[in-house]
Image (spheres, rainbow, N blue to C red):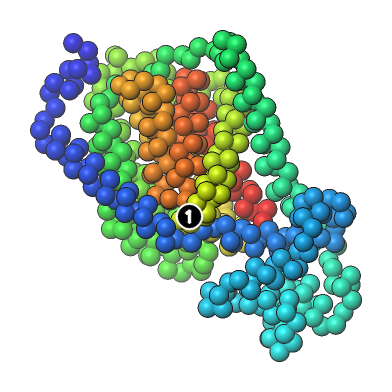
Amino acid sequence: MSPSSHRQAHVPSWKVLLGVLSLLVAALIWTSGLVNSLSRPSVAPSLNLQQQEVQLLAEPALPHAIGSALMGSEDPRTMLLGSLEQIPATDRSRRQAQLLALLQNEVTSVLEIAPADDPLLEQLLCEAGGAVRDDCINTAIARGAALRLSVSALLPLVTAVTGTGLLLVQGWRIWRGRRENWPNLMGPNLTLLDMALLVAGGFVVISAVGVPLLALPLVTRLTAALDSPRREAVGVVINYSVMALPSLLILRRQLASLPQETSPEGGWLQWRWQPLPGAFVTALLGWFKVTPIVVLTGWLLVRLFGDPGGSNPLLELVLESRDPLALSLLALTAVVLAPLFEEVIFRGTLLPVLARRTGSLTGAVLSGLLFGMAHISIGELAPLTVLGIGLALLRLSSGRLVPCVLMHALWNAVTFVNLLLL
């Protein structure tokens, strides 16, 4: 009898009941969260506004041909004015109302505006005061905006072209029968019941209870003296840590209960840090390959169904924040904490268990779907599921967990940098 069979033969009934209840409650929480995410605003309008502001600042520093390629034929000033006019007056921020007044040449409102180290407001206020437009342009700011706009436009293009090329090469190799054989999948010798307790019980149910009961009072106490956005950034770090802790403790106990003599070389999670340069290269190639597919999935979703909303609130925090400490804390969560925790759970533990019972490809799809659902965002469900499948395939093809962590961190880091550029 195998160790896994031995474990299944002596499962207490209370553990089975707890696993079933965890699955039912987790399904209810995820379903409710996905439905409620429809009422959350999409980050797309904010991104669009930020991009139009950068275009307006960058326009004087861009040659006409390059400006037309990056911004199209429509005047950035007209585009920004139209976007601001579409926002209901009750929903406009004070700054958006000020920009709208300046673009509409409403002199009475303009007199009340204090730029407060805001380059775009300063430029428009200078023009509203009757100065020649060229005299109101800060050359250094215009060049910086042009650089940001160029990078934010060219980086996705270069990534998409490179990734598509790599996918075509890989497709050709598979068609010619030259695909490299994947290594044997190693992972924790756990059961599906263990996964129900880990993912549904620890990651979803306990976290859903623990965050409101433990994290919120702690956040309130620790951030009472902080101003926004530092208060929100500290809250994000604490909330995520409290959410991750139950699953990690459950996993630690589950791994400790396994016979250590059966542990594969490299450990149950197969981190296999060395050779580290190879892990970086593998992660980079995986990121290039998955990016065009994720982007295409998101584009098709919007084209077929429109923008469903429900964006991750963290994206809005990054867009609105200009505080270095707040941005550092948000980057720590997105680029370090999230990749480490999520890869341990989904690719280090869940994927090997599912793959042993359903096959490698089916396990990759199922783990990717659960990964997408775990983010509780209906608008990001399909793209994140594709990303999760890509990470699972990287785990299967490399036989290591470290490249998955690095690829996940790279994905989040590039997203973070794109938001900062805007």
Residue at x 58% of width, y 61% of height: 45
Q: Is residue 48 rendered to the left or right of residue 4?
A: right
The reply to whether residue 323 is in sight is no
Between residue 252 and residue 88, name the one nearer to us: 88
- Residue tagged by mark 1? 308
Q: Is residue 336 rendered to the left or right of residue 124?
A: left
Residue at x 29% of width, y 18% of height: 260
Between residue 108 and residue 228, name the one nearer to us: 108
Q: Secondary structure at mark 1?
A: loop
Q: Quadrant of residue 47?
A: bottom right
Q: Position of residue 13 (x, y in %)?
A: 10, 33
Q: Position of residue 420 (x, y in %)?
A: 64, 54
Vertical arrangement, residue 1 with respect to residue 105, above or below = above
Vertical arrangement, residue 111 with respect to residue 213, above or below = below
Q: Position of residue 403 (x, y in %)?
A: 53, 28
Residue at x 55% of width, y 75% of height: 88
Q: Quadrant of residue 170?
A: top right
Q: Residue furthest toward the left? A: 13
Placement of the C terminus among the 4 image quadrants: bottom right
Residue at x 48% of width, y 67% of height: 226
Placement of the N terminus among the 4 image quadrants: top left
Q: Position of residue 164 (x, y in %)?
A: 65, 30
Q: Residue furthest toward the front? A: 304
Q: Residues within 10 Å of mark 1 (few under 14, many from 20)?
A: some
